[in-house]
Amino acid sequence: MCFSAPIQPEFAMLQTLTANSLNKEVIAYFSRAVMPSQQETLGAIVVEVLRSGRTLSRKAICLRLMARLEKASLPEEEQHLQELVGLLFSE
């Protein structure tokens, strides 16, 4: 026989507070995460282009950067990607 005892309200509240606390800690951790360096971002884009079977070119890199820019959710991320787009067209 399996008996299940009702969860006491104090315990349920403790679980909720613990879960909320954990969520806040996870959010805080990821908000402190550092943006990848320009080299890391460009390296990831180069790998994406090559794995897709396309020829690596300035145009292909720019298209990938623009796609990422459209999906950027943070102002810092947008600035990071805009700087990389600027590098493609600077001499």
Image (tube, rainbow, N blue to C red):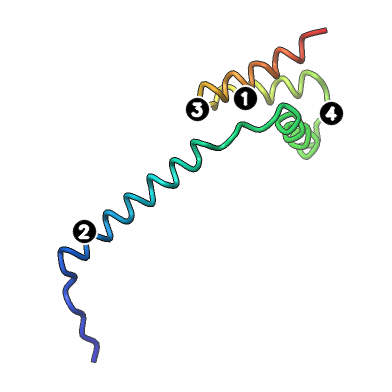
Task: Residue 38 in the image: state x and y as whole percent.
Answer: 72, 26
Query: Which residue shows up at 83% across the image and 27% down it?
Result: 56
> Which numbered disc, 2 or 4, marks the residue that appears first in the sequence?
2
Q: Are marks 3 and 2 in contact (CB under 8 Å)?
A: no
Q: Please identify, in this view, whether the residue under mark 3 or under mark 2 is nearer the observer.
A: 2
Q: Please identify, in this view, whether the residue under mark 3 or under mark 1 is nearer the observer.
A: 3
How many neighbours does mark 1 have within 10 angstroms: few (below 14), some (14-19), or many (20 or more)? few
Query: Which residue lies under the disc numbered 4?
Result: 55
> Which numbered disc, 3 or 1, marks the residue that appears first in the sequence?
1
Assign a secondary structure to mark 3: loop
Q: Are marks 2 and 4 in contact (CB under 8 Å)?
A: no
Task: Residue 72 in the image: state x and y as whole percent.
Answer: 54, 26
> Which numbered disc, 1 or 2, marks the residue that appears first in the sequence?
2
Query: Which residue lies under the disc numbered 2?
Result: 13
Q: Please identify, in this view, whether the residue under mark 1 or under mark 4 is nearer the observer.
A: 1
Q: Pick the quarter of the image with the C terminus.
A: top right
Query: Which residue lies under the disc numbered 3?
Result: 73
Q: Residue 28 or 74: which is nearer the viewer?
A: 28
Assign a secondary structure to mark 1: helix
How many neighbours does mark 4 have within 10 angstroms: few (below 14), some (14-19), or many (20 or more)? few
Q: Are marks 1 and 2 in contact (CB under 8 Å)?
A: no
Q: Please identify, in this view, whether the residue under mark 2 or under mark 4 is nearer the observer.
A: 2
Query: Which residue shows up at 25% across the image and 60% down it?
Result: 14
User: Which three-letter amino acid code belongs to the residue tagged 1?
Assistant: Ala
Task: Residue 40 in the image: state x and y as whole percent.
Answer: 73, 33
> Which numbered disc, 1 or 4, marks the residue that appears first in the sequence?
4
Query: Which residue lies under the disc numbered 1?
Result: 67
75 lies left or right of 82: left
User: Which three-letter amino acid code belongs to the residue tagged 4?
Assistant: Thr
Where residue 1 sits, quadrant-wise, is bottom left
